[in-house]
Image: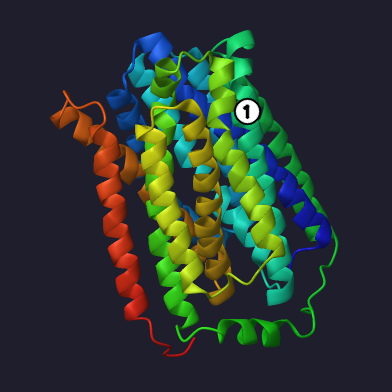
């Protein structure tokens, strides 16, 4: 079990990781548009490539961390990400940008599963709720802040800032991990779980006729589809900014609405836990997510899109929270389950942009085809979710 000092350090690491990764990955698409003339189709293809690499790499990374240790994996991941950012700032070709992004993605594979696992390792269900609540609020707030200010950073400091600022943050993270590892080895951590936790978890899980493992499977299905929607939106933000004549700074504020709403949703869901093991909340969030996605991409009024982002952000918060909570609550191998949770995310990061890019490639005369194609894919996910619920009668944990 990790000490409270290490847990606090992990929250700092994840906040820095959210700032760095969101700044780079969100504004990379602006840079590719401005420097290389990338269209929505090309940006979606770029995002799909990152998602495919992450899906494959993070599953291995979770197993590596479980076997070789979380601190080693974190040092490896942050170091590779920092090097990739330095390369990205110096390479001036499209293949070079692809290579830097792929290397950065491979490094990132070794970070998120470890941060999730250290947060959750050998915790009682009572403490697990609290720690995952803090974890979700920290990373989502970091992502929202990075998007909110990133446009202004890009506008005033230039394209190099989206590489050099993350590179600096990754260097700080490596130093922090080294310090946390020394602290962990030098001081014995408490081993006793908080009293009464398992009883509370069992009572909570038994509120539903559906087994906890069925909820885990449903969340593992819903979460990648939520990432399908999110990552079909992010690459086309430059196009939406052009549509509404927004500057990069204004686009950053506009694009941060759903991210900040997601952070607020995490805060609410952390304090109010009646959604645990309740299918109707997961289903309602999925429906709101799909509707919000379609409105963001197809709506013609800026304020309507802002309102849709609020609902979208809260909905994806519940879906993500479900996946992470059930992954950590149901299983004992936190690193491997964290890796699977993140691999499912990678599948969504790949699937949404891939479907959007393919639809624009085959139907170039229909500029909104990516929105309709991804919405149709989300309906497939809805049908899958309902089917799992019907077949998820309790068979034990």
What residue is drawn where x is 41% and y is 90%?
Answer: 395
Is residue 55 something that shows in the picture? no
Q: How many marks are shown on the rendered structure?
A: 1
Up the image or down, 310 lies above or below 93; here it is: below
What residue is drawn where x is 68% and y is 59%?
Answer: 133
> Residue 388 sits in which quadrant?
bottom left
Up the image or down, 382 lies above or below 37; here it is: below
Choose between 128 and 390: the one closer to the eye: 390
**Residue 189: where, in percent of width, then height?**
81, 68
What residue is drawn where x is 68% and y is 38%?
Answer: 16
**Residue 208: where, in percent of width, then height?**
51, 83
Residue farthest toward the right in the current orientation of the protein: 187
Q: Which colour scheme is used?
A: rainbow
**Residue 46: where, in percent of width, then height?**
34, 29
Label 1 crowd (10 A; few <14 / some 14-19 / many >=20): many
**Residue 17: where, in percent of width, then height?**
63, 39
Residue farthest toward the bottom in the current orientation of the protein: 395
Residue that numbered label 1 is attached to: 148
Up the image or down, 179 lies above or below 359; here it is: below
- Quadrant placement of the N terminus: bottom right
Is residue 133 something that shows in the picture? yes
Choose between 90 and 115: the one closer to the eye: 115
Q: Is residue 348 left or right of residue 6?
A: left
Question: Dot 1 lies on which element?
Answer: helix
Up the image or down, 301 lies above or below 190; here it is: above
Choose between 166 and 39: the one closer to the eye: 39
What residue is drawn where x is 27% and y is 35%?
Answer: 370
């Amino acid at each position: 079990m990790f000490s409270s000092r290490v847990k606090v350090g992990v929250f700092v690491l994840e906040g820095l990781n959210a700032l760095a990764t969101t700044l780079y990955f969100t504004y990379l698409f602006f840079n590719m548009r401005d420097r290389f003339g990338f269209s929505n189709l090309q940006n979606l293809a770029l995002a799909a490539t990152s998602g495919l690499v992450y899906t494959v790499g993070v599953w291995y990374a979770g197993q590596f961390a479980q076997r070789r240790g979380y601190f080693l994996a974190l040092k490896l991941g942050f170091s590779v990400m920092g090097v990739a950012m330095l390369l990205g700032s110096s390479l001036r070709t499209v293949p070079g940008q692809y290579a830097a992004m792929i290397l950065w993605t491979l490094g990132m594979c070794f970070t998120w599963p470890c941060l999730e696992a250290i947060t959750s390792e050998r915790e009682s269900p009572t403490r697990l709720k609290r720690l995952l609540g803090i974890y979700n609020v920290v990373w989502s707030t970091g992502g929202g802040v990075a998007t909110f200010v990133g446009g202004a950073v890009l506008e005033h400091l230039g394209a190099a800032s989206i590489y050099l600022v993350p590179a600096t943050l990754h260097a700080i993270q490596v130093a922090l991990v080294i310090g946390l590892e020394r602290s962990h080895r030098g001081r014995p951590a408490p081993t006793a779980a908080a009293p009464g936790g398992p009883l509370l978890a069992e009572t909570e899980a038994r509120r539903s006729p559906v087994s906890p493992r069925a909820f885990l499977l449903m969340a593992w299905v819903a979460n990648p589809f939520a990432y399908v929607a999110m990552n079909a939106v992010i690459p086309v933000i430059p196009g939406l900014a052009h549509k509404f004549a927004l500057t990069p700074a204004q686009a950053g504020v506009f694009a941060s609405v759903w991210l900040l709403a997601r952070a607020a949703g995490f805060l609410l869901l952390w304090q109010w836990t009646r959604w645990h093991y309740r299918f109707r909340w997961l289903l309602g969030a999925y429906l709101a997510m799909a509707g919000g996605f379609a409105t963001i991409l197809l709506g013609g009024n800026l304020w309507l899109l802002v309102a849709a982002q609020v609902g979208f952000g809260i909905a994806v918060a519940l879906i993500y929270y479900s996946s992470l909570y059930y992954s950590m609550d149901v299983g004992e191998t936190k690193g491997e389950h964290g890796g699977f949770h993140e691999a499912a995310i990678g599948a969504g990061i790949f699937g949404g942009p891939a479907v959007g890019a393919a639809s624009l490639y085959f139907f170039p005369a229909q500029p909104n085809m990516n929105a309709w194609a991804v919405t149709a894919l989300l309906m497939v996910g809805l049908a899958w979710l309902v089917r799992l619920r019907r077949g998820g009668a309790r068979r034990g944990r």
